[in-house]
Image (tube, helix red, strand yellow):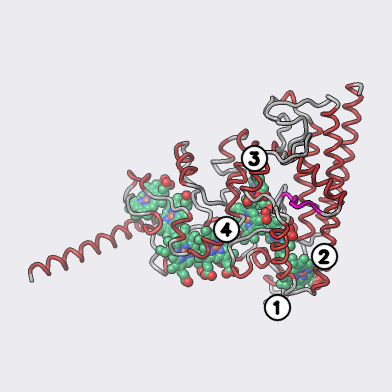
């Protein structure tokens, strides 16, 4: 009897201990970071007793042991949300960190922008980091950014409604080389969405969002046929187009510009899934998204739209290849010389604006910056506009700017040749 009483007392105190530990997190953090506690308290997690210590552990209890607080990675979320975790893991977002780190330019830029997450790394935090990667980051003093799940439903509200708002995608899918937000929000698809929100269209009116097309049925795996780079294998059947794509692949350093054979970079492209490399993979993604369009449009309307898209891409790529060849000829004739970390005497897009290739700013080549902008800013806009149904991006921000870039490249090459007497 006495024994039982002691046990009951023990259980009671350990329960009290746990409850007060939890209360501690909240009472103390209500003073330290009230906004955070407020956010959590309106979440489904608060309703379901998923308290601070479930995600952060309970080793940290005061201002003196802050470093003992665990910062939860995606595996912590997976304990209760396995389905979304597994979909995410299979999807393209899971390659964001790897793709960024695969680029040579990343390792020439300030760390604050990469590991620190204030530039490229602010958007490319998407992707589950390996234990090894995390250890290395921690050793270099980077403690945060362990979780990709809080990128669309942000902490600590972790709200589904927030993630269903297209604005959840805006921070990353905007701007210089992927203005999907700008294109969609000013297209008929987007403007109808906003009209609906303002009550100017009935709530039932059709207006597809990013999520409707890219995360149908809440599927956390997402991927597209052309991807970001808009290159693919097998090459297009059309001969002229295939030739233009080969030229682009050389400037990406995936094909050797001299022999035309694949380089070690092809392995990187494969590993980070930078392009679809079989017809089956390409068609699967195409058909998946077409099936979304068919919900609101006729099959013929949509099939014609995609056919036009592909034939427009051919023209874009031929313009691009022409510009690459002009700059490549400057290397051939010794007017531009291989420098710094450059592998081939040929333009290399993976060094971005650093057309000195790490060699020193006295060796910048302006013509290559114009070529790069033609590729990353204007070619991207031209092709992405088609899918996001935006006429102004298709013409003025896309095609017209590419034509202007080509004109400038022709003019600059002429001047450079005159200066070199070649
Ligand atoms: C007595 C006050 C106190 C208690 C109790 C407390 N914390 Fe904290 N916590 C702090 C302070 C102070 C900081 C540092 C805040 C700062 O950097 O401005 C902190 C920081 C944190 C951080 C951020 C760690 C980082 O590296 O930035 C997390 C996560 C955290 N607390 C979670 C918890 C959890 C979970 C509990 C309960 C198990 C808890 N806290 C209990 C005071 C407290
Ligand atoms: C469902 C899991 C979950 C719960 C519950 C949770 N957090 Fe967090 N918390 C996170 C994640 C994810 C991060 C970001 C980790 C990273 O960036 O590495 C984070 C980061 C933090 C940080 C550091 C970053 C910042 O913005 O200051 C603090 C402090 C923090 N949480 C406090 C709390 C407190 C206090 C509670 C309870 C009121 C709580 N957390 C509940 C998942 C959670
Ligand atoms: C211990 C279990 C547990 C953990 C760990 C956990 N969750 Fe949850 N989560 C829940 C429960 C329970 C719900 C409520 C489910 C419901 O209402 O159907 C929920 C709901 C959600 C929702 C939907 C909210 C809404 O508005 O409907 C999101 C998003 C979410 N969690 C994200 C996360 C993320 C991200 C993490 C990791 C940082 C995480 N959860 C960790 C249990 C957990
Ligand atoms: C504003 C957010 C943002 C910033 C900043 C950013 N990126 Fe990206 N990046 C994205 C998005 C979004 C995509 C995918 C775009 C698409 O598919 O149209 C992407 C695509 C890429 C890809 C191609 C990935 C693939 O699989 O096709 C690479 C490589 C890349 N970025 C590297 C970088 C590097 C290096 C930097 C910094 C110099 C950088 N990014 C800066 C958001 C960003
Ligand atoms: C009406 C459907 C639809 C909507 C709405 C939509 N997209 Fe797309 N998106 C597509 C299609 C179709 C493709 C290209 C498929 C292909 O390559 O064949 C695409 C491609 C993409 C790509 C890959 C690169 C590119 O632009 O081609 C990204 C990234 C993307 N969309 C993000 C977004 C974001 C973010 C939003 C919202 C701001 C959005 N999309 C809205 C249909 C849509
Ligand atoms: C690209 C943005 C994005 C990222 C990243 C993301 N989610 Fe989501 N999540 C969404 C959207 C959108 C929804 C709402 C889907 C729907 O209901 O159609 C959602 C819904 C959820 C829900 C609620 C499911 C339900 O139906 O109640 C959970 C749980 C969840 N996500 C967990 C996670 C976890 C875990 C991760 C990380 C592995 C993650 N999410 C990463 C956009 C995202
Ligand atoms: C934190 C930044 C971030 C947010 C928020 C984000 N994305 Fe992304 N997204 C990226 C990055 C980075 C990539 C490129 C991933 C890679 O390199 O593999 C990407 C890739 C994609 C792709 C694949 C393009 C391809 O190559 O096929 C689609 C589709 C996409 N995002 C849609 C969305 C949608 C829809 C949302 C909102 C619900 C969203 N993203 C929110 C950063 C983000
Ligand atoms: C949820 C319904 C819905 C889905 C899904 C949808 N659309 Fe639309 N689309 C509309 C509506 C509504 C309009 C505006 C009315 C109109 O012009 O028919 C529109 C307009 C268009 C237009 C004409 C724009 C203009 O300027 O006249 C094109 C082209 C288009 N959509 C293509 C697509 C493609 C491609 C897809 C799939 C990637 C798609 N749509 C998916 C509802 C949808």
Q: Judge the density around disc 3: few (<14), some (14-19), many (≥20) Cα neighbours within 10 Å.
A: some
Q: Earlier in the sequence, mark 2 or mark 3?
A: 3
In the picture of the structure, the residue carrying the numbered disc 3 is: 103
Q: Which of marks 2 and 4 is nearer the N terminus?
A: 4
Q: Which of 248 and 7 is in front in this view?
A: 248
Main secondary structure type of the part rendered in magenta: loop
* Quarter residue 264 falls in: top right
Which SS class for mark 1? loop
Eye-nearest disc, 4 or 3 = 4
The magenta span reads: 229-236
Q: How far apart are marks 1 and 4 (CA)?
A: 37 Å
Using the image, tell me which numbered label, if any, was put on residue 90: 4
Mark 2 CB lies closer than 8 A to ligand 8: yes
Which SS class for mark 3? loop
Q: Which of 287 and 94 is in front in this view?
A: 287
In the picture of the structure, the residue carrying the numbered disc 1 is: 202
Eye-nearest disc, 2 or 4 = 4
Using the image, tell me which numbered label, if any, was put on residue 284: none
Residue 405, percent across and down? 85, 41
Q: Is residue 193 visible?
A: yes
Residue 132, percent across and down? 47, 43
Mark 3 CB lies closer than 8 A to ligand 4: yes
């Amino acid at each position: 009897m006495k024994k039982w009483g002691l046990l009951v007392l023990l259980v009671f105190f350990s329960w009290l201990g746990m409850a007060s530990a939890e209360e501690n997190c909240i009472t103390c953090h209500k003073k330290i970071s009230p906004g955070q506690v407020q956010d959590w308290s309106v979440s489904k997690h608060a309703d379901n007793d998923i308290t601070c210590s479930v995600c952060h552990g309970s080793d940290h209890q005061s201002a003196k042991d802050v470093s003992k607080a665990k910062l939860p990675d995606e595996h912590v979320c997976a304990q209760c949300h396995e389905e979304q975790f597994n979909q995410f893991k299979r999807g393209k977002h899971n390659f964001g960190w790897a793709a960024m780190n695969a680029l040579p330019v990343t390792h020439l830029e300030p760390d604050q922008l990469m590991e620190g997450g204030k530039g490229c790394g602010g958007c490319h935090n998407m992707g589950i980091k390996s234990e090894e990667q995390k250890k290395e980051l921690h050793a270099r003093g980077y403690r945060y950014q362990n979780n990709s799940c809080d990128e669309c439903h942000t902490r600590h509200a972790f709200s589904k409604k927030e993630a269903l708002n297209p604005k959840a995608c805006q921070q990353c899918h905007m701007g210089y080389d992927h203005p999907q937000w700008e294109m969609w929000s000013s297209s008929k698809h987007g403007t109808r969405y906003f009209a609906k929100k303002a009550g100017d269209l009935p709530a039932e009116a059709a207006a597809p969002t990013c999520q409707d097309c890219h995360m149908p049925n809440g599927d956390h795996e997402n991927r597209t046929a052309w991807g970001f780079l808009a290159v693919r294998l097998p090459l297009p059947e059309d001969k002229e187009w295939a030739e233009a794509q080969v030229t682009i692949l050389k400037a990406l350093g995936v094909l050797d510009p001299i022999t035309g054979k694949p380089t070690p970079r092809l392995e990187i492209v494969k590993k980070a899934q930078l392009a679809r490399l079989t017809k089956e993979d390409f068609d699967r993604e195409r058909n998946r998204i077409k099936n979304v369009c068919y919900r609101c449009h006729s099959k013929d309307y949509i099939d014609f739209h995609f056919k036009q898209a592909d034939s427009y891409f051919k023209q874009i790529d031929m313009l691009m290849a022409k510009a690459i060849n002009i700059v490549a000829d400057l290397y051939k004739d010794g007017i531009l010389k291989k420098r710094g970390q450059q592998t081939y005497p040929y333009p290399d897009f993976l060094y971005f604006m650093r057309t000195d290739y790490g060699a020193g700013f006295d060796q910048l080549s302006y013509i290559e910056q114009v070529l790069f902008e033609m590729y990353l800013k204007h070619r991207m806009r031209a092709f992405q506009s088609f899918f996001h149904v935006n006429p102004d991006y298709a013409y003025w921000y896309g095609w017209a700017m590419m034509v202007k870039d080509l004109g400038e490249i022709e003019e600059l090459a002429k001047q450079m040749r005159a200066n070199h007497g070649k």
